[in-house]
Image (spheres, rainbow, N blue to C red):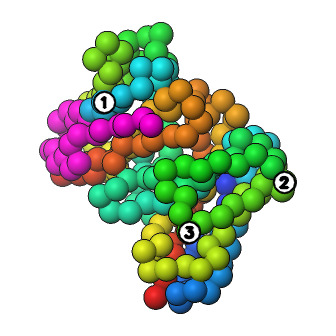
Amino acid sequence: EAQVTQNPRYLITVTGKKLTVTCSQNMNHEYMSWYRQDPGLGLRQIYYSMNVEVTDKGDVPEGYKVSRKEKRNFPLILESPSPNQTSLYFCASSLVEVRYNEQFFGPGTRLTVL
Amino acid sequence: GENVEQHPSTLSVQEGDSAVIKCTYSDSASNYFPWYKQELGKGPQLIIDIRSNVGEKKDQRIAVTLNKTAKHFSLHITETQPEDSAVYFCLSGGSNYKLTFGKGTLLTVNP
């Protein structure tokens, strides 16, 4: 089954404790992206990657890191989480021409930073 | 960067009525306009899209219309049903690979 998986689905942590949210897709997509969803603000892009070792900032990259060492995986790293990063996070993947193609979203990761 | 405005932010209709959600965009180079539906507890899922070479596209009870001159596109849902209740997002890709979603519309269909 074609899918995007994220882990963990729920995470409660404390300020400053490094964490990683994993994302994996089995569709051989070149493009992958991370979004955060906050009430009233919709989906905002954090980082995206057009292929292995190619990443770029979205609209809200501050406080986040990503890496793309393999085509199928695109982890989101919070090196020193803060309470304002409490949010619902989605990973998505698409063919490289994402401007003309469907994005497939993961189920989401709800993160709470205390 | 691309600016996408989506209205209304909330919409409540009676079952069987029609619902219309509108998005305006700023980047005249945008050529692809999808709509995503997000059900409670799930990730967004594409429901319909349109490319700039057509003005309207239909898929059963849903349709999307595009006015490139005015830079806006709309989602139309006819004969609404309770299962249409969800958050709907529009998206404009603009001329680069950074993507901008509208802020979303919470549609509630009352039985």
- Residue position for label 1: B24
Question: Which quadrant of the structure image shows residue A106?
Answer: bottom right
- Residue position for label 2: A70
Residue A69: where, in percent of width, then height? 84, 56
Q: Secondary structure at mark 2?
A: loop
Q: Which residue is at the far right?
A: A70
Tell me if label 2 and label 3 are in contact, CB under 8 Å. no
Crowding near pointer 2: few (<14 within 10 Å), some, many (20+)? Answer: few
- Residue position for label 3: A63
Residue B15: where, in percent of width, then height? 19, 43
Of marks 1 and 3, the one in the foreground: 3
Crowding near pointer 3: few (<14 within 10 Å), some, many (20+)? Answer: some
Q: Amino acid at mark 1?
A: Thr
Whether residue A70 sits left or right of residue A82 in the image: it is right
User: Disc 1 is attached to a residue of which chain?
Assistant: B
Residue B23: where, in percent of width, then height? 30, 33
Q: Is residue A80 above or below residue B109?
A: below
Tell me if label 2 and label 1 are in contact, CB under 8 Å. no
Residue found at x 65% / y 48%: A56
Q: Quadrant of the image for the N terminus of chain B?
A: top left
Q: Is residue B9 a member of the stretch shown in magenta? A: yes
Residue found at x 50% / y 32%: B93
